[in-house]
Amino acid sequence: MRNASQLTGFAKREDLRFFLERILCAEYRHEPLFAPTREMLRKYRAGQYSWEDYEREFLALLRERVVERRFSPDLFALPTVLLCSEASPTHCHRRLVLEYLRGHWGGLEIVHL
């Protein structure tokens, strides 16, 4: 969602697109439906939400967006990377997205780097 911020360094949208293509022959795809709303993120970062509150609201957002039907498991047929600014998967939306999709599709192998 914030892939154009000056704080992202070389993880800016266009830089990522360039490096992935040139170095790995990989495609960059920005999927806002896998991201929390700005308001959810703001409340969590401001301490107005506990992690449990954030997780509950984010999972409800994924259900509302019906991401399991809007995307195909084929999206993950090749090695796929989800990015976010969190250093570990413990408090990270990418983990929640993948666990949610695995719960609907099954067979999704999740590896946290």
Image (tube, grey):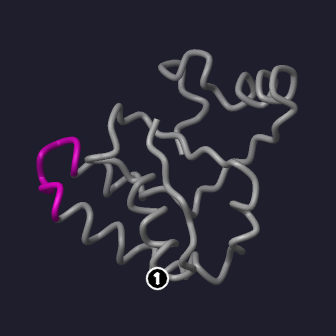
Q: Quadrant of residue 63?
A: bottom left
Classed neighbour count for the residue bearing mark 1: other residues with Cα under 10 Å, few (<14), some (14–19), many (≥20): few
Tell me the residue at 66%/48% (across/down): 80
Q: Quadrant of residue 107?
A: bottom right
Q: Where's the N terminus, which quadrant?
A: top right
Up the image or down, 104 lies above or below 17; here it is below
Q: Quadrant of residue 5?
A: top right
Where residue 48 sits: x, y (%)? 12, 53
Direction from residue 78 to residue 90 in the image, left or right: left
Tell me the residue at 35%/66% (across/down): 58
Direction from residue 43 to residue 102 in the image, left or right: right
Tell me the residue at 49%/55% (across/down): 110
Up the image or down, 105 lies above or below 40; here it is below
Where residue 71 sits: x, y (%)? 69, 73
Is residue 51 one of those drawn in magenta? yes
Q: 73 or 12, which is in the foreground?
A: 73
For label 1, the SS is helix
Direction from residue 10 to residue 102 in the image, left or right: left
Where residue 43 sits: x, y (%)? 22, 51
Tell me the residue at 24%/61% (across/down): 54
Is residue 22 one of those drawn in magenta? no
Check disc 1 and give the amino acid type: Glu
Residue indicated by mark 1? 64
Where residue 22 sits: x, y (%)? 87, 21
Up the image or down, 48 lies above or below 26; here it is below
Residue range highlighted in magenta: 44-52
Up the image or down, 93 lies above or below 87; here it is below
How many numbered markers are drawn?
Answer: 1
Q: 43 or 89, which is in the foreground?
A: 89
Direction from residue 26 to residue 84 in the image, left or right: left
